């Protein structure tokens, strides 16, 4: 058994106009008043905007990439 990659949604933080990766489980919880991205950036729920990403947070990209098992990342070598 391998752990599936973490499910995330990319939302823009109004604080830095950058799209961070937020765990989908957090976004699905209506009781949350703020969200915490996988890079530890936190933003109040009302300041997280769902729009098409333009500027990705580099830290989130690296951390999200690290969640993907090597055998999925390098399938083309197969
Ligand atoms: Zn981030």
Image (spheres, rainbow, N blue to C red):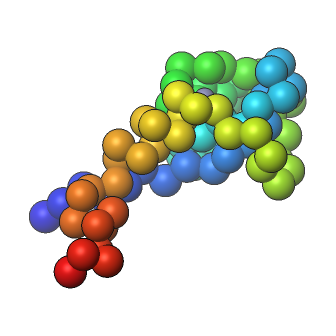
Q: Quick one: which residue is furthest to the left in this view?
A: 1
Identify the residue at horizontal 53%, vertical 28% (top origin): 59
Q: Residue 61, position in %: x, y?
A: 53, 40
32 in relation to 42, above or below: below
Q: Position of 77 compared to 1: left or right?
A: right
Image quadrant of ligand 1?
top right
Q: Quick one: which residue is furthest to the front in this view?
A: 77
* Nearer to us in this view, 29 or 7: 7
5 in relation to 44, above or below: below
34 in relation to 27, above or below: above
* Nearer to us in this view, 9 or 69: 69
Identify the residue at horizontal 59%, vertical 26% (top origin): 36
Mark count: 0
Q: Residue 45, position in %: x, y?
A: 78, 30
Q: Residue 22, position in %: x, y?
A: 60, 39
74 in relation to 34, above or below: below
In which quadrant of the rendered view does residue 11 lie?
A: top right
In which quadrant of the rendered view does residue 75 lie?
A: bottom left
* Nearer to us in this view, 27 or 31: 27
Quarter of the image with the N terminus is bottom left
Q: Is residue 67 visible?
A: yes
Q: Residue 70, position in %: x, y?
A: 24, 58
Q: Position of 68 compared to 40: left or right?
A: left
Q: Is residue 28 visible?
A: no
Identify the residue at horizontal 83%, vertical 19% (top origin): 15
Identify the residue at horizontal 35%, vertical 43% (top origin): 66
Quarter of the image with the C terminus is bottom left
């Amino acid at each position: 058994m391998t752990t599936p990659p973490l499910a995330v949604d990319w939302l823009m933080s109004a604080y830095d106009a950058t799209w961070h990766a937020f765990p989908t489980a957090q976004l699905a919880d209506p009781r949350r008043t703020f969200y915490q991205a996988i890079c530890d950036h936190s933003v109040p729920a009302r300041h997280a905007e769902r729009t098409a990403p333009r500027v990705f947070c580099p830290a989130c990209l690296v951390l999200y990439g690290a969640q993907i098992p090597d055998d999925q990342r390098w399938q083309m070598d197969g």
